[in-house]
Image: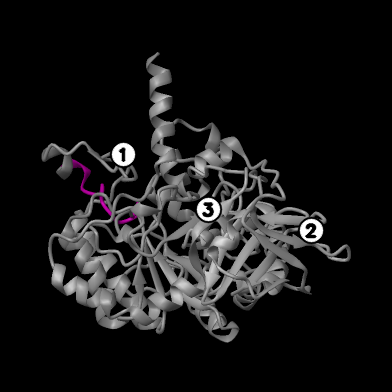
Amino acid sequence: MKKSLFLITLIFISLNLNSAPQDKIPEVHTDEWKAMNASKQETFEWFQDAKYGMFIHWGLYSIPAGVWNGVKTHDMENRGPTISEWIQYKAHIPREEYAQLATNFNPILFDADAIAELAMAAGMKYLVITAKHHDGFALYDSAVSEFDVMDATPFKRDIIAELHEACKKADIEFGIYYSHNIDWADGSDGRTEEYRNKGWTLEFNRPIDFGANTWDPSPNTFEEYLENKAYPQVKELMRQYPNMKLLWYDMPWRMDAEQSWNFYKIVYDIQPQILINHRIGNGFGDYSIPGDNKIPENLDEMIKPWETVGTFNNSWGFNGYDQDWKSPTEILYWLIEIVSKGGNYMLNIGPTGLGGVPVESIHNLNTVGEWLKINGEAIYGTQKWTTFKEGPTNINMGGTRAREVDGFNAEFSTEDFWFTHKKNTLFAISLATPSDSVVIKSFAQSIGEIQSVEILGYGVVDYKQTKAGLSVKIPNSFEAELGYVIEVKF
């Protein structure tokens, strides 16, 4: 019984990993934060028009690829998530032993231009990469730590600099991920002992030591880590890579308000246009993340602009044995469901230890990109409408673990439509193979008189608007394997 309860608790923690709490007004520096946040209006407008981006999790963890000493992360002791970038935490690998991976990090297949071009071909408008993940290893040349790609590896190329430049050439906006609270190399024990002494045992539905290096903590204090590594590295990133749009912090629950504020102000003082996600902690985020692989159900809780982040399979870093790839149809479902609800979708790829992008990711991204070339007008620059969807198919995406367990087996009906709009135009998006005619109930006469109806990529089609809905004739010559968009003008 105790073992079952323990497993249930772990599943609960996994399902709620990084889920979004209600965004709250900061308790300190409130007026300063509000003024800084308000000054970013131009970036907010870009963000809410862009809709679709690429996330990249890459680092030393791509070498073991989910297996340590012959044991898969899914077969290891029940502590922490099974995602491959958490392998050091999952296997309790000592810092010195894990650091030896750097001597084998020589990703000769890495091609920044090819990745930026892949994002562009996929229809993505921005790219965010892990400059430093929880293991503490930096993918750029850091002056304050030798645990980076230039000093610790034979590769000796600044990966962040190369991608930053490649995105500029491809007209892809650039951003970085930085693990500010968790650093298994230099973050001490993440203040867990300090919090226990204060009587704090649970935060964000997690044990207070969750994510902290308690098996081999660095000898310094957490405050020394912040002052000597984390704050200086964020300053370096801001100075070395100008004109960025996004900064992605992660897992803040042991940060106090002053520390979160410092991470916000450091960025603002150097690149004031950058939007910062809510995982900075303590309410200082400019935009919200509902959770990993999670689509919000209650949109009233999303009081800030928001973005869902998703994996291509069930891991963020490369996992050599996970072949559960999202199909083009599933990717489109996530994108359309999210955009119809007013959010952005940032889909992750995990390059291999040699720097190559898995072929499944390349193929499926390109397939979605071809669909967006025809139908992107219904995605980019749109807003959510009064109704986001009609039809019988409803899928609850409750997080990474839920997606892994339940899979994706939806069969979309010709009655399923998602809606977006811009100015005097409404879009009805279908993921089904078109039938001879369809009826869109939400476009009945009550919404106003329709002036024209066309199918994107085909042209004007016959229609009839009644009290029951909009009946659209689908031409026999029209084919759409991955779905289509009906554009309605008023």
**Residue at image mark 3:** 316
Q: Which of pointers 1 and 2 indicates the residue nearer the eye? A: 2
Name the residue at 52% across, 44% down. Answer: 397
Name the residue at 64% across, 70% down. Answer: 488
What label does residue 258 carry, if any? none
Residue closer to the observer: 386 or 485: 386
What label does residue 206 carry, if any? 1
Judge left or right: residue 96 versus residue 252.
right
Cα separation between marks 3 and 2: 29 Å
- For the C terminus, the quadrant is bottom right
Chain-order first, disc 3 or disc 1:
1
Chain-order first, disc 3 or disc 2:
3
Which quarter of the picture shows residue 201? top left
Cα separation between marks 3 and 1: 20 Å
Per the rendered image, the range of residues in magenta is 183-193
Residue 186 visible at all: yes
The picture places residue 420, in percent across and down from the top left corner, at 55, 65
Residue 70 visible at all: no
Label 3 sits on a secondary structure element that is loop
Cα separation between marks 1 and 2: 43 Å
Count of number-bearing discs = 3
Q: Amino acid at mark 2?
A: Glu
Q: Categorize mark 1 by other alpha carbons within 10 Å: few (<14), some (14-19), many (20+).
A: some
Which quarter of the picture shows residue 305? bottom left
The picture places residue 367, in percent across and down from the top left corner, at 73, 64
- For the N terminus, the quadrant is top left
**Residue at image mark 2:** 481
Residue 78 drawn in magenta: no
Cβ–Cβ below 8 Å for labels 1 and 2?
no
Name the residue at 59% across, 62% down. Answer: 445
Q: Amino acid at mark 3?
A: Trp
